[in-house]
Image (tube, grey):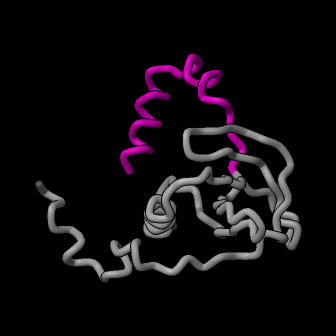
Amino acid sequence: RYFAHVNENRPRDYWDYENMTIPWGDQSHYEVLRKVGRGKYSEVFEGINITNNQKCIIKVLKPVKKKKIKREIRILQNLCGGTNVISLLDIVIDPQIKTPSLIFEYVNNTDFRALYPTFSDYDIRYYIFEVLK
């Protein structure tokens, strides 16, 4: 119960995601290039910000309660700038079907199923240490 009272020392907007107002960005700034993955609550695409030609990742959320979306956004905003944390660049919504999407920085990666079997003991120790930072 070490962290039981951690929110008492934080400002209300740090933990009160239910009353937050989402700062919706402009969806027309982004174009989808290809699908890169999917999960239970989203589909993930490689995209491009057409205003500055920067690659990005577009996470299109499946229909879920607004409370879950707000919680994920607040957590991502709070973690932003942390060590080994992907940056949330923008939050957009499709004006017609009201589907929200999260825009993240693009990081070139290798699929973990191909990467993990190549790890040495040292590699495993290094990456576990990086995760724990």
Q: Residue at x 85, y 59 (%)?
A: 31
Q: Please name whichever residue, 52 or 91, is drawn nearer the observer in this view of the structure.
A: 91
Reply yes or no: does residue 109 show up in magenta: yes
Q: Residue at x 65, y 76 (%)?
A: 24
- From the viewer's perspective, tell me whether residue 99 is left or right of residue 13: right
Rendered location of residue 109, percent (x, y): 68, 39
Q: Residue at x 45, y 28 (%)?
A: 124
Reply yes or no: does residue 11 show up in magenta: no
**Quick check: can you spot residue 80?**
yes
- From the viewer's perspective, tell me whether residue 85 is left or right of residue 94: left
- Check the image and name the residue furthest to the left: 1
Vertical order, 20 against 118 (above or below): below
Rendered location of residue 74, percent (x, y): 45, 68
Rendered location of residue 65, percent (x, y): 49, 59
Q: Which residues are magenta?
A: 107-133
Q: Which of the image's four quarters has the N terminus?
A: bottom left
